[in-house]
Image (cartoon, rainbow, N blue to C red):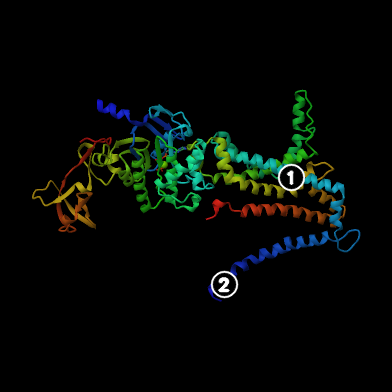
Amino acid sequence: MTEQTAQNANVKLRISNMTKRYSNGDGVSDIDLDVREGEIVTLLGPSGCGKSTILRTIGGFIGVDKGEILIDGKPVQNLPPEKRPTAMVFQSYNLWPHMTIFDNLAFGLQIKKVPKKEIAARIDKMLHLVHMEGHEKKYPTQLSGGQQQRIAIARALLLEPSVLLLDEPFSALDAKIRAQMREELKRIQQALKITVVFVTHDQEEAMALSDRIVVMNKGVIEQIGGPTEIYDCPKTRYVASFIGEMNFLPGANGTEIAVRPEDVWLDDAMEPEMSAVIRTIMPLGHYTKVGLEMGEHFLRAYVPKTDAAGLRVNDSVALTFHKKYVYNQNGGLQQ
Amino acid sequence: MDQERKNKILPYLMLMPAMAIMAIVVIYPIFSCIATSFTQEEAGGFGLENYLYFLADPMQLTNIGYTLAIVLVTVVLAVGIAYLLSIYLRFSNSRVSRWIGKLYLLPRFIPGLVAVNGMITIISNSGLLNRLSRLFGADWQLGLIYDAKGIILMNLWFNIPFATMLMGAAMSAINNSEIEAAKDVGAGKLRIFWKIILPLTYRDIFISATFVFMSNISSFTTPYLMGGNYPTMMGVTMYNLYGNQHFGRSAALSVIMFILSALSAVMYIYVNMRKDQWEKN
Ligand SMILES: Nc1ncnc2c1ncn2[C@@H]1O[C@H](COP(=O)(O)OP(=O)(O)OP(=O)(O)O)[C@@H](O)[C@H]1O
Ligand SMILES: [Mg+2]
């Protein structure tokens, strides 16, 4: 009980029972989410599942049909974006192309009537934080995509928001820059201890970045948990199939058995519970991906390199499932 | 002949017929018109007589001034209204805006003559509006017909859709996130207009203005059908001069018109070529 009150005390953002439907019926329903101070929470899900919709209701760019959004305990769902203590970074076209980087950063501060000297000092400090010193006089088109997003993050941070919202900010960047920006964001977030809600459809990004992940499916939340928890204990069949790799086999009474490839163990027990025939062997560096045929089903197994040495295609092997999940007909976890 | 040389020559060969037609129907008449304009009607031979006629005759100066005044008022009103309309169409999601978005080009598809006659039956002194007003015991004499106001009204009908289309393209080049980012940092509607929308689209205002200017300076149908006897717009003046066998003078007037158009074309080219600092890479 005391622990829960302590947790409630530093809830930065609370979305309760929120529904937003567009006129065509798409949208999100019954969203409940608490984001604690200093936390990075990621909304993860396939395209069209409603991630941006949730983020945009937090930022005030769209209204809600039902429910409440509280920031620092105050309801904000009826405030316009400029009155909310949030700042948003979009996927692209964040910066105003006709303004220099300095003017882009100064715009919001000028509106807030911050004195000129202080504006310059704060921009200086912020450019330093995002490693973009010396670019003040350039225009956005003269920067690379990654640099533009750094400036966009800097501009959002200059507003000193209670909650920083990022909508797939790195998805237009190539893989290497994306990984780098991810680390940068993590570093900046930890330096400022700021609360972040991050949207992505890239589970690797979500895993790498988040304290907690919100897995979404067709407008509803399927599961909320830390990266390890989501991976090790997927509460629904959907989460099991969406996060990481998973083998699915039919179980008894319409249930489904799910096993991660690394939990499919090959051994040569004399009286095996299950046996399968090796169809493919694909060495992938430190582990080997083995394709197995078991009756009419196909399975994948990840075998450590050393154990894979003795395997041959068409060998019969015994299988044990080190860990498995059983999902009932409704997709809920049974065991 | 190797493939490469063939590829170089082929496009020019293919352009030849078009170029020949251009030379016959455009370039030759231009030069012949310029030549005619310097052919003196009274003194004979070549000289500036025809041009001096327009600069010396107070009635002709009035006609030119009248034309410029109508065209400038048309430009300001058409471009101004179209600019506001294009902003409305771009940033409003209401049903009204969607309908206007679908319908605003309709006037472009109605033949000019039909539209002018339609307008006349509505606004003339015994037209539809007058008759409606008489139902309520009033007797509106709008005085729009055979007057500059009627011509301007008609010009707006033709030019607002056109200018809206041009500036609508500029508006749709503004990304939603650019506007939303401005809201996010605290900018209100007016500030977003002055600091974001206007700087990103002001050039298209000038471009639309030059197009509207050029297409109206030489207009004929509307002023011929709706204008009065005096002053007349340059298109009608030219028609009258030609009808009275003043070929030299009407040619000179075309050259004057051409120069006025060229001035606005220069502005068009200047504005179009001019790159703002932020567009240079
Ligand atoms: N303005 C709108 N009007 C109508 N429907 C919309 C609108 N915006 C989004 N939608 C629909 O709502 C659903 C959720 O959209 P949303 O943008 O939140 O998805 P998303 O999870 O962010 O997807 P993505 O990863 O592709 O960005 C989609 O089916 C989308 O087509
Ligand atoms: Mg999205």
- Whole-percent x and y of residue A290? 21, 54
Chain hosting mark 2 = B
Left or right of B178 in this view: A233: left
Left or right of B72 in this view: A145: left
Chain hosting mark 1 = B
Picture quadrant where residue B8 is located: bottom right
Left or right of B163 in this view: A226: left
Residue at the far front in the pictured view: A117
Q: Residue at x 75, y 55 (%)?
A: B259
Q: Residue at x 74, y 45 (%)?
A: B71
Mark 2 vs 1, N-terminal side: 2
Picture quadrant where residue B95 is located: top right
Question: Which residue is denoted by mark 2 in the rendering?
Answer: B6
Residue at the far right in the pictured view: B43
Q: Establish whether labels 2 and 1 are both on one chain.
A: yes
- Which dot marks residue B71? 1
Which of B63 and A137 lies nearest the eye of the viewer? A137
